[in-house]
């Protein structure tokens, strides 16, 4: 079945980025000139997704406003004959059919995904974390996973290998490599200690999941950090049906982390034709 729907959880507390995230969600922090969440929505759209559900938390209005029309702003830009900016602003609200739902309390990523049950219905769906940006010049990360889903007719986790000491930050796959970029998922463990990690293959914020996850999620008790973990539900699902991990191509940034945010900012600025040369010159002048 075709993957047409995507869910973007953006209801976390963003404690790693306080105080910036006191009044705005971390998914709205800009990388150069676009909020992180817009990069994620664009990736979904470029991967063929038609309907997107954003899971909102306590600061819901800035996200809803960003993807809605802004008539006053458009009129003002029109009056000032700022045609390029007008086009940019308008194009955001035309990106896709964007729906929203509220997660009243941040009880974990699994709990956030469960809020999408009615929206998803009986179809396979994508999950893209709202604070993970992946840059790739060819097929977008999600498109690569959707292709793998369509080939194998099984849930696919987007993974990359990480340095051994970083396994403590991610869901880690216990699996066997069966193809250049493909692993079977035989086990999964959320944020293991370096010693207990079965591998350094980490799940990095992109998934294509079969709708059978919902009954499993409903029965999944709180796990690590007392949160309902998507990793725990995926582990249960993998025991019933085959599941794969796909080592996607692309440079991934954890924008919810200060270091990742700064790396994204510098690298996207260096890719921006209007900033590239002057910014490079500035970086060189720092003589670190
Ligand atoms: P994170 O674990 O990175 O988000 O969740 P967090 O809890 O906000 O982070 P810190 O550690 O406090 O800084 C990954 C994604 O899942 C969403 C987050 O918004 C983020 O996009 N999320 C997490 C939810 O939507 N609901 C939750 O209950 C937890």
Image (cartoon, helix red, strand yellow):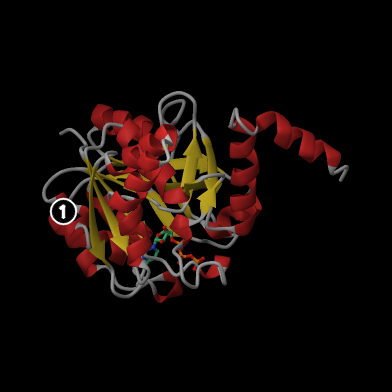
Task: Tell me the crowding category of disc 1: few under 14, some 14 to 19, or many 20 or more residues within 10 angstroms, Cα based.
Answer: some
Relative to residue 169, is residue 114 drawn left or right? left
215 and 285: which is toward the camera: 285
Where is residue 54, by image quadrant?
bottom left
Question: Where is residue 262 drawn, in percent x and y?
Answer: 64, 50
Q: Secondary structure at mark 1?
A: helix
User: In what quadrant of the picture does the N terminus appear?
Assistant: top left
Question: Where is residue 251 drawn, in percent x and y?
Answer: 55, 36
214 and 238: which is toward the camera: 214
| Residue carrying label 1 | 119
Seen at 32% across and 40% down, the residue is 90
Is residue 233 visible to us here?
A: no
Q: Quadrant of ligand 1?
A: bottom left
Question: Where is residue 45 drawn, in percent x and y?
Answer: 31, 36
Where is residue 20, by image quadrant?
bottom right
226 and 275: which is toward the camera: 275
Residue at far front of view: 79
Seen at 64% across and 54% down, the residue is 259
35 and 17: which is toward the camera: 35
Is residue 38 visible to us here?
A: yes
């Amino acid at each position: 079945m075709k993957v047409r729907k995507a869910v973007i959880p953006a209801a976390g507390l963003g404690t790693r980025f306080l105080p910036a995230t006191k009044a705005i969600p971390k998914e709205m922090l800009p990388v150069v000139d676009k909020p992180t969440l817009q990069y994620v929505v664009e990736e979904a759209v470029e991967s063929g997704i038609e309907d997107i559900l954003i899971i909102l938390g306590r600061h819901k209005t800035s996200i809803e406003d960003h993807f809605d029309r802004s008539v006053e702003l458009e009129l003002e830009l029109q009056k000032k004959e700022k045609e390029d900016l007008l086009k940019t602003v308008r194009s955001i609200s035309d990106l896709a059919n964007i729906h929203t739902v509220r997660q009243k309390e941040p009880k974990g990523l699994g709990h956030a995904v469960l809020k999408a049950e009615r929206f998803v219905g009986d179809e396979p769906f994508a999950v893209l974390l709202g604070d993970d940006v992946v840059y790739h010049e060819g097929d977008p990360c999600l498109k690569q996973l959707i292709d793998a889903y369509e080939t194998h007719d099984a849930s696919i986790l987007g993974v990359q290998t990480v340095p051994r000491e970083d396994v403590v930050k991610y869901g880690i796959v216990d699996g066997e490599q069966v193809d250049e970029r493909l692993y079977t998922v035989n086990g999964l463990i959320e944020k293991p200690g370096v010693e207990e990690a079965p591998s350094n293959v980490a799940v990095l914020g992109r998934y294509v999941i079969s709708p059978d996850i919902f009954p499993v999620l409903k029965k999944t008790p709180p796990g690590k950090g007392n949160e309902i973990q998507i990793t725990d539900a995926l582990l249960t699902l993998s025991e019933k049906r085959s599941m794969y991990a796909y080592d996607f191509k692309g440079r991934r940034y954890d924008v919810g982390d200060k270091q990742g945010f700064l790396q994204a900012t510098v690298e996207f600025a260096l890719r921006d034709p209007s900033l590239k040369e002057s910014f490079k010159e500035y970086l060189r002048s720092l003589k670190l």
